[in-house]
Image (cartoon, rainbow, N blue to C red):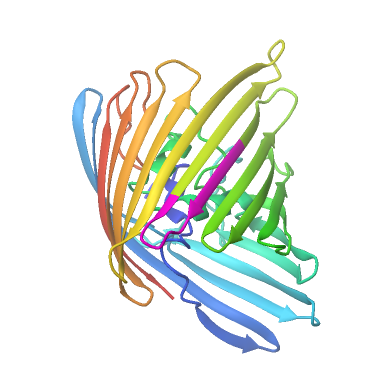
Amino acid sequence: MKLGLIGVAALMACAPVMAQEGGIKTAVKGTDLTIYGVFDLYAARYSTTAAGVTETTTEVGSGGVGGSRLGFLASRNVNADLTVGGRLEAGINLDSGRIGSSTNPVEATARTDRVWSRQAYLSIASKKFGEVRLGRQQGPTYQFMTQYDPILMPTVDGWGVLTTLGSQVAGSTSGFYINPTIRTDNTIYYQSPEFNGFHVKTSYAGRDSKDTDKSIFDFSLNYGKGPLNASLLLLRASGSKTSTDVNEAALAASYDFGVVKPYITLIQRDTTNPALTGGDTSNQRTALLGAIVPVSKEGQIRLSLGRYSNQRANRDATGLAIAYTHDVAPGFMVYTGLSLLRQDSDSRIPIFTSAIPDKGKSVNAITVGAAFRF
């Protein structure tokens, strides 16, 4: 499977979609160790018009609702307050057995030599003062996405499509940093203790290698108490004096009524090129609505409707997705989904790994799959 920025979305975590089964827990020389994994395989069919020809493609891939992976999470209590530990997590393309999740949104070129391609970090946690993590990880931006996307099925998901925005197309509109793909190297992460339902998450990923052309700072203020969850997320990606700087902000909320759980997310992106006289600023916006509707103890219908707006003329797009997930047994799920993407006359956004459409052409996708988590 070829992995571009959109392709990496297949390797997302999916906590809202499938509950973590807890893994295999053991103790080794005073250290608590959890071994966990996900096996996810799907078949997808995409239809669009490319190079003037109706193009229909079918593929088998890995990571329809959760990236296939193998992980190790270790921790040791130093005293009643302090815990130290770490995580090693490798992404796997189950269809081929190859390493998965090998790219970064801030890397100049894709990396194919990662062993622990998803996460690799050291952590120090205090009940009083919060947790610090150091290493490669998925920070506030990634966690924001997993919490407020009701579908989390990248093969059809309108949320992911309208935030990655066809980044596989040379010269196309770049995607948001607030999207389902972001993991960063060399990252310092902090999460505060919870206070009356509020907590803060923040991280900084610096420019300390030739592979990264931007540093990323993000900050989120989160509230979760009872049925209500809400978050404010701020992100800045900055590079040299001549490179484009990016500022993004997002606001999201969900509320669990029991019979339905609605979601709303708003994302704003402003870019500035300091190399131009006075700076050249442009903006993009995405608004997303969604819902989860339980239809049985095991089954859920998932809905997503998104609208992408670009300051440049004729670049807007609308995505609609509907999916169904069914828990067959603890840790084992089957799923299916359908997505429709309509776009303006100068837009060429694909869905996941579909053919790159001609300008203004719609894209349809349907997928079926199964995932097992331990």
- In the rendered image, the vertical position of residue 361 relative to residue 101, given as above or below: above
Q: Using the rendered view, name the quadrant where residue 301 is placed.
A: bottom left
User: Can you see residue 222?
Assistant: yes
Residue 173 in the image: x percent, y percent?
A: 48, 27
Residue 59 in the image: x percent, y percent?
A: 26, 50
Name which residue lies at 68% across and 25% down.
Answer: 243
Question: Is 14 left, or right, of 137 in this rendering?
Answer: left
Q: Using the rendered view, name the quadrant where residue 88 is placed.
A: bottom right
Q: Which residues are magenta?
A: 249-262
The tally of labels here is 0
Name which residue lies at 36% across and 61% down.
Answer: 259
Q: Is residue 250 magenta?
A: yes
Residue 18 in the image: x percent, y percent?
A: 41, 66
Question: Is 224 left, or right, of 37 in this rendering?
Answer: right
Question: Is 137 left, or right, of 360 in this rendering?
Answer: right
Name which residue lies at 74% across and 74% down.
Answer: 84
The one of 203 and 59 positioned closer to us in this rendering: 203
- What main secondary structure does the magenta stretch of the protein show? strand
Q: Is residue 207 magenta?
A: no
The one of 269 and 251 positioned closer to us in this rendering: 251
- In the rendered image, the vertical position of residue 158 relative to residue 272, given as above or below: below
User: Can you see residue 103?
Assistant: no
Quarter holding the C terminus is bottom left
Spot the residue most to the top.
277
Residue 119 in the image: x percent, y percent?
A: 59, 60
